[in-house]
Image (cartoon, grey):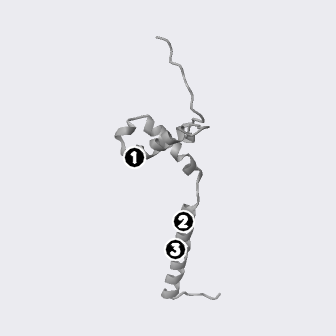
Amino acid sequence: MVKYHLSHRTRASTVLKYLLIGATAVASAACLPSESRASEWGCQVLLCLSGDWQGTPSCHPPVHRLIAAMKDPGFSWPTCPQANSSAARYGKYEDC
């Protein structure tokens, strides 16, 4: 049986090569569009409109985008799949 011993320099270069390949794979995956990005705006709108959006600076861009979109013909409400809500609905309150 032949034993193969790597020198310290060769071992370090191999580890560095695999780290570089791993970092490249992670960076490439982060650049790809994901489904959650497509619905992110709908979820932001849902969260912002459930509270005081005017008092929350991070809510200003998504709500202003919503207001601008509402002016367009054929407007449809953005959805948030994580909230199990596929469309805007109206639910009548029970009579008192």
**Mark toward the start of the polypeptide (2 vs 1):** 2
Closer to the camera in the image, 61 or 5: 61
Residue that label 1 marks: 58
Name the spot of residue 39 as percent of width and height, x first: 56, 46
1 vs 3, front mark: 1
Q: Which residue lies furthest to the right in this view?
A: 1
Q: Residue furthest top?
A: 96
Q: What element carries label 3?
A: helix
**Mark toward the start of the polypeptide (1 vs 3):** 3
2 vs 1, front mark: 1
Name the spot of residue 85 as percent of width and height, x first: 57, 35
As shown in the figure, which amino acid type bears the numbered disc 1?
Ser
Which residue lies at the image location 53% right of the left edge and 41% below the top edge? 69
The quarter of the picture where the N terminus appears is bottom right
Residue that label 2 marks: 26
Number of marks drawn: 3
Which residue lies at the image location 50% right of the left edge and 18% below the top edge? 93
As shown in the figure, which amino acid type bears the numbered disc 2?
Val
Which residue lies at the image location 50% right of the left edge and 42% below the top edge? 68
Q: Do the residues labelled 1 and 3 touch (CB within 8 Å)?
A: no
**From the viewer's perspective, is residue 63 above or below residue 26?**
above
Residue that label 3 marks: 19
Alpha-carbon span between mark 1 and mark 3? 36 Å
